Amino acid sequence: MTDNFTSLLSFLPQLWEGVQTTLILTIVGSIGAVIIALILGLAMTSEHGWVRIPARIVVEFFRGTSLLVQLFWLFYVFPLLGVDLEPMACGIGALALNYGAYSAEVVRSSIKTVAPGQWEAAIALSLSPSRRMIRVIFPQAWALMIPSLATLLIQLLKGTAVVSFITLSDLTDKITQLRQSTNETYFAFTVGLIIYFVIAWLIQELMNFLERRATAALGRSRPNSRNDRRQARRDARMSKSTDPGSTSIAGPNSGNIGYGGPL
Amino acid sequence: MIWNWEFAAEALPLLLRGFVNTLIATVVGTIIAAILGLIIAVAIRGLPRWINWLVRLIVAFIRNTPLVVQLIFVYYIFAGIPGLVDVPALVIGFIVIGIHYSTYMSESYRAGIDSVPPGQHEAATALSLPPVRTFTAVVLPQALRATIPSLGNYAVAMFKDTPFLFAISVVELVTSAQQFGAAKFAYTEAFTLAGIIFLLASYPTSLLIQRLDRRLATY
């Protein structure tokens, strides 16, 4: 066992290289996926068929064909078409397209789930369509989509393991190397799986943080915050003023417009 | 455009032969995952706290680590057992995929069981049905109704993950496409056809599941 740890210690720099490759793929791939998801997801909510239908086709195409098919297409077929891509670019491209398509569906359904009253209110206030989306609808949809995006992000991290098939030396590749040099299958793979698990856990924590922030921005979280307590006191005062005994004549500033009697 | 119909015609039978392995892995994997997922979901409810915690940790661990790495890991484990001669890679493949997805499916079962109104449970208790019968005859049938569409979605996801069996050299659809492409230098035809086959199989299935979802919806 101590042998294993000494060889792990000497292998650490290489392992770190592999972790870096995996992290770059995950981070750049997920940024690409989010950009693709926003574009396609918003396009799929469009009223115009010529925007919505092509976006839907692209999404179904990349969801329906497997990640590995897309990766091999970029890696093997693109050079034949005269486009030479670095293996790293192939990996990032395939991950971004595949998970971008899955996320686009999340973006679309979250936008559709925002309460219709919010849309109507934004229209009633005559906000321009872009302002309506950016200031009213999207912040609410964003809070809804984060949990699903977190799941997909972890799936993307797991998906990065396939890049070892296209000559990239990521964490998975380094694990098999470690296994070869130590000849200890259990040890090498346990170390590797734990590293993946820790990265996934960090992603989950990050996304939980983002979700807390997003819901806090909407004023929905932390029911015991100072603002809520202030609001509760105000409500209590209001209800006292609407007491039927004290406000038989409702003045303009009494807070209950058009209501004379008990609620 | 470099597209050779002759290569395409030559590749298709090979790809379809590979596709048989893809289907076997998907179907057997789904059966394993559906059964094991239910066992996990039920076990998590009934077990004492510390084992429960351990089971959850293992489930989270399998869920959040790459399937590819798990496949290679188990492949080497089987290769390292001296008495065991030649377990086919396909068998290792569907076992590992099945276990991997059982961790997802257990979540669906859990949600399904939680969605059964508590009154059902109470009514069964009031009728003094034994606990096992309460679960199998009252709670589970109602839970399954809510669970089945989500199991179907995972089956489709599993189908799209079967190319990962490439890692342990199972000759499924994508592996056979890769082999054909390398032999004839006809990657365009091989991978395009592989993609089309995937699309033709998975898209109608997802539509069916959507319809099933609407049909089985209780509300």
Image (tube, coloured by chain):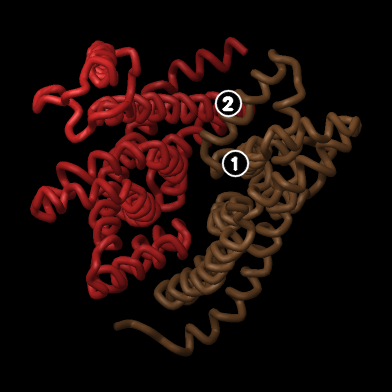
* For residue B55, above or below residue A173: above
User: Which disc number belongs to residue B31?
Assistant: none
Screen quadrant of the C terminus of chain A: top left
Q: State left or right for residue A186 relative to residue A209.
A: right
Q: Residue tagged by mark 2?
A: A190
Count all numbered tags in the image, as a single digit: 2
Chain of residue at mark 1: B
Q: How far is mark 2 from mark 1, CA to CA?
A: 21 Å
Instruction: Characterize the local packing of mark 1: few (<14), some (14-19) or many (20 or more) Cα atoms within 10 angstroms.
Output: many
Q: Residue furthest bottom?
A: B6
Question: What's the colour of chain B in the image?
Answer: brown
Viewer-side residue, A218 vs A115 = A115
Q: Is residue A253 visible?
A: yes
Q: Amino acid at mark 2?
A: Thr
Of all chains in the rendering, the one displayed in red is A
Residue at 76 percent of width and 40 percent of height: B139
Q: Amino acid at mark 1?
A: Tyr
Q: Residue tagged by mark 1?
A: B104
- Residue A145: image location, x then y, percent: 35, 42
